[in-house]
Amino acid sequence: MKKDVMKSIFKPKPRSPTDLVRHVRELLIFVETNKEVRESKREEKLTELGKTILEIRTVLFGNGTAEPNPDACVQITQEFFKEDTFRLLVLALPKLDLGGRLHSTHVVANLQRQRVNSQLLASQYLEKNMNLMDILIPGYGEGDIALTYGAIARECIRHQCVARYVLESDHMRKFFGYIQTPNFEIATDAFSTFKELLTRHKSTVAEFLSKNFDWFFQEYSSQLLESSSYITRRQGIKLLADMLLDRSNSAVMVRYVSSLDNLRILMNLLRDSNKSIQLETFHAFKLFVANQNKPPEIVSILVTNKTKLLRLLANIEKEDEQFQADKGQIINEIAALGP
């Protein structure tokens, strides 16, 4: 009995939400700056860091029986973005175990969405700390940490200012390499981030594609659409169709479908042995045919290859009314073309 009383007297008081973040910051600073400290002490601090990050995650998401407390979430958000906790956490992620990385990713994802007095503190913080993306995006070349950094990068791209920063940087050229990395998981994750950058913020994407049209679509064709990998070709053609069919990109689409080189690449993809690639290609190819102001060289290629194209299109099938209607219209348009 006496023991229990003593235990309850000396039991540490639970930390407040603000103190939890402060404690994480102290541990992060220790891990980052005390590189000469003995290994056992360092491991002890990393274990404590992992536990405290999990505590923060529990406050933000609830514990399964109780919903998260909005005031506690506000306190954590304010403290997290008040100082450089986010940057310190990103730098420490490679040192954490898989559980610690996963919980950190959940915490960061939650904090990107938290509003304090209707304001997104994450967006304001990142606007002043854009170079965090210069740590996260190159993570795709780092192997072990790639998936964690990729997940956090996608959360940051939710903010338009961050997406614009990445789109306007040299990182965009490097994505073509990341997407083709031999590690399937990393390549798939890199493509998810690439797709997010090119679809989420419509006006920013349209501006990027207009300004960078020549080099971007040249790389896109040679690296993705003409790749020897079936998965890369399929992902590439599907994303291309999504971009061209988006109304925000109408000026880019008109420019794209006026190019003879682009038409040749898509005609080759229509002949791909994979039915899924043929189907995805149709959605981009139909824009060349439907264009009411086709340049003469485009008309000439379509007329020269009329018989082959009609045969290829007849073999592309999908049980979908809209698809059948589109296909019928495109077949009629091609059949009606004359020299």
Image: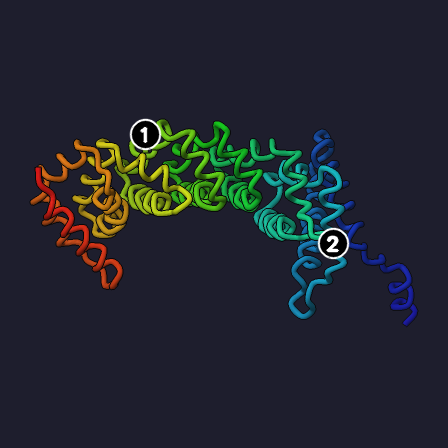
User: Between 25 and 269, which is closer to the camera in this rendering?
Assistant: 269
Three-letter code, disc 1:
Gln
- Which quadrant: the C terminus? top left
Residue 231 placement (x, y as % from top left): 31, 45
Q: Which structural element holds mark 1?
A: helix
| Along the line of sight, the residue nearer the viewer: 27 or 178 | 178
| Residue 51 seen by the camera | no
Tell me, yes or no, if residue 308 can be seen here.
Answer: yes
Q: Is residue 59 left or right of residue 130?
A: right
Provide residue 39's location: percent of width, then percent of height: 69, 37
Which quadrant would residue 212 be assigned to in this image? top left
Q: Residue at x 14, y 54 (%)?
A: 315
| Distance between the alpha carbons at the discs numbered 1 and 2 | 46 Å
Q: Please give the count of numbered marks on the rendered protein.
A: 2
Disc 1 crowd rating (10 Å Cα; few below 14, some 14-19, many 20+) is few
* Residue 254 on image: x %, y %: 31, 38
Residue at 72% in and 29% down: 36
